[in-house]
């Protein structure tokens, strides 16, 4: 199944990063950290101007709507909710 966002919406696939290990040996999942979330843009709507497919973007933990398609978790988010683009 393919998702085509409308207008200024962007479909983002969550990045899968390894768990961070504390000096005490405890693994901290990303959801427990107070930092922006990161993902890769997989589809964009017709009115999106700043980002393109393939960009890695940062967004707030509570932004957009989470959906699951074929066991893959995505986020549908407005372009204005994107905090920034990660440049490589």
Image (cartoon, rainbow, N blue to C red):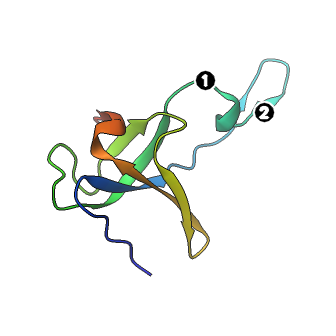
Residue 34 numbered tag = 1
For residue 5, side relative to residue 33 (left or right): left
2 and 1 marks in contact (CB < 8 Å): no
Q: Nearer the viewer, residue 78 or 82?
A: 78
Q: As displayed, is residue 36 above or below residue 79?
A: above
Q: As displayed, is residue 81 above or below residue 7?
A: above
Q: Please, what secondary structure does the residue beneath circle 1 have?
A: loop
Mark 1 burial class by Cα count in 10 Å: few <14, some 14-19, many 20+? few
* Residue pointed to by mark 2: 27
Can you say which quadrant of the picture contains the C terminus? top left
Q: Residue 16 appears at what percent x and percent y?
A: 57, 50
Quarter of the image where one finds residue 19: top right
How far is mark 2 from mark 1, CA to CA? Answer: 15 Å
Residue at 49% across / 30% down in the picture? 36
For residue 9, side relative to residue 1 (left or right): left
Q: As displayed, is residue 24 above or below residue 13?
A: above
């Amino acid at each position: 199944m393919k998702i085509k966002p409308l207008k200024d919406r962007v479909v983002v696939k969550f990045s899968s990063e390894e768990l961070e290990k504390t000096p005490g040996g405890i693994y901290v999942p990303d959801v427990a950290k107070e930092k922006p979330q990161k993902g890769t843009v997989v589809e964009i709507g017709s009115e999106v101007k700043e980002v393109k497919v393939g960009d890695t973007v940062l967004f707030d933990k509570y932004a957009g709507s989470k959906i699951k398609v074929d066991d893959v978790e995505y986020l549908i988010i407005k372009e204005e909710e994107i905090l920034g683009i990660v440049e490589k």
